[in-house]
């Protein structure tokens, strides 16, 4: 595995004993929360591989809950995240699985708020870095390193052209884009890693487009001290 810098090896500023088991887990929780759009009422977390074997001893459970509460990796509230979840009215269930997973440190996060239900499958891949492999069972490749626009939309001709045109006209560059669909003319999901977060004006324009069903922005740097990255 190639590392981009020394921080990929030593990990970020964090609360917990392990960048893989705590910092990465907190980031996965925050991505899931941003995918839902708010603090979930209920969450079910299924752990695989090393996560399943050691999640309580390494504080992975507390880090995941902390992330779902929007705590960053070095938030001092993480050790008490379970109690904070109770106070926030968030019900949490943990399960372990012996089934194969894309990476030893893998978690499936299923979250609910009212009628909205979201799921995420992702892994903590070392040094606090993460890789999200699926959102609502659509295949994606999200690192969390860049602002990421996620759109659910109908699989119709011209939708992506309209979306990319609206974004490019704002001067924001798309660094990476992946599209997955469940069936021809069915529902599709597009994830775009961007050089900067889209403005509210761009988001309003995208929401007005035909066949766009839902939009979420995943940005782990939102509301965080830049020195933490």
Image (tube, rainbow, N blue to C red):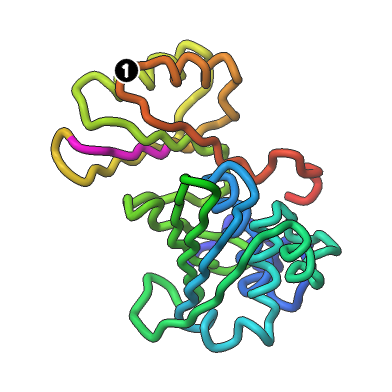
Asked if the magenta segment contains residue 190, the reply would be: yes
* Number of numbered labels in the structure image: 1
Q: Which residue is found at the position 78% from the left and 63% from the top?
A: 84
Horizontal side of residue 139 vs 150, given as left or right: left
Up-down: is 93 above or below 193? below
Hey, which residue is sitting farthest left in the picture?
Answer: 184
Up-down: is 218 above or below 112? above
User: Which residue occupies the foreground of this view, 107 or 23?
Assistant: 107
Corner quadrant of residue 206: top left
Q: Residues within 10 Å of mark 1 (few under 14, many from 20)?
A: few
Residue 49: % across, % down:
46, 82
Q: Which residue is found at the position 32% from the left and 17% from the top?
A: 210
Q: Which residue is found at the position 73% from the left and 70% from the top?
A: 82
The residue tagged 1 is 210
Hey, which residue is sitting farthest right in the picture?
Answer: 76
Q: Which residue is found at the position 66% from the left and 65% from the top?
A: 65
Corner quadrant of residue 212: top left
**Magenta-highlighted stretch: main secondary structure?**
strand
Residue 162: % across, % down:
33, 16
Which element is circle 1 on?
Answer: loop
Q: Which residues are magenta?
A: 186-191
Up-down: is 170 above or below 7? above
Residue 224: % across, % down:
77, 44
Hey, which residue is sitting farthest top in the picture?
Answer: 169
Horizontal side of residue 68 vs 159, given as left or right: right
User: Which residue occupies the foreground of this view, 120 or 22?
Assistant: 120
Horizontal side of residue 93 vs 110, given as left or right: right
Asked if the magenta segment contains residue 204, the reply would be: no
Residue 207: % across, % down:
45, 20
């Amino acid at each position: 595995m190639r590392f981009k810098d020394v921080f990929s090896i030593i990990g970020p500023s964090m609360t917990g004993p392990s960048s893989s088991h705590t910092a990465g887990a907190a980031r996965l929780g925050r991505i899931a929360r941003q995918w839902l759009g708010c603090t979930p009422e209920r969450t079910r977390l299924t752990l695989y591989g090393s996560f399943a074997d050691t999640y309580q001893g390494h504080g992975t459970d507390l880090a995941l809950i902390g992330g779902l509460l929007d705590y960053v990796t070095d938030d001092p509230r993480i050790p008490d995240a379970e109690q904070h979840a109770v106070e926030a009215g968030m019900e949490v269930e943990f399960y372990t699985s012996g089934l194969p997973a894309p990476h030893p440190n893998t978690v499936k996060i299923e979250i609910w708020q009212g009628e909205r239900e979201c799921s995420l499958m992702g892994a903590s891949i070392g040094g606090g870095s993460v890789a999200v492999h699926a959102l609502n069972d659509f295949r994606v490749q999200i690192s969390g390193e860049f602002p990421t626009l996620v759109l659910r939309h109908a699989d119709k001709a011209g939708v992506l052209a309209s979306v990319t045109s609206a974004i490019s006209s704002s001067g924001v560059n798309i660094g990476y884009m992946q599209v997955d669909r469940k069936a021809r003319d069915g529902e599709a999901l597009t994830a775009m890693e961007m050089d900067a977060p889209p403005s509210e004006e761009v988001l309003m324009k995208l929401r007005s487009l035909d066949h766009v069903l839902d939009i979420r922005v995943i940005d782990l740097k939102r509301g965080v001290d830049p020195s933490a990255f």
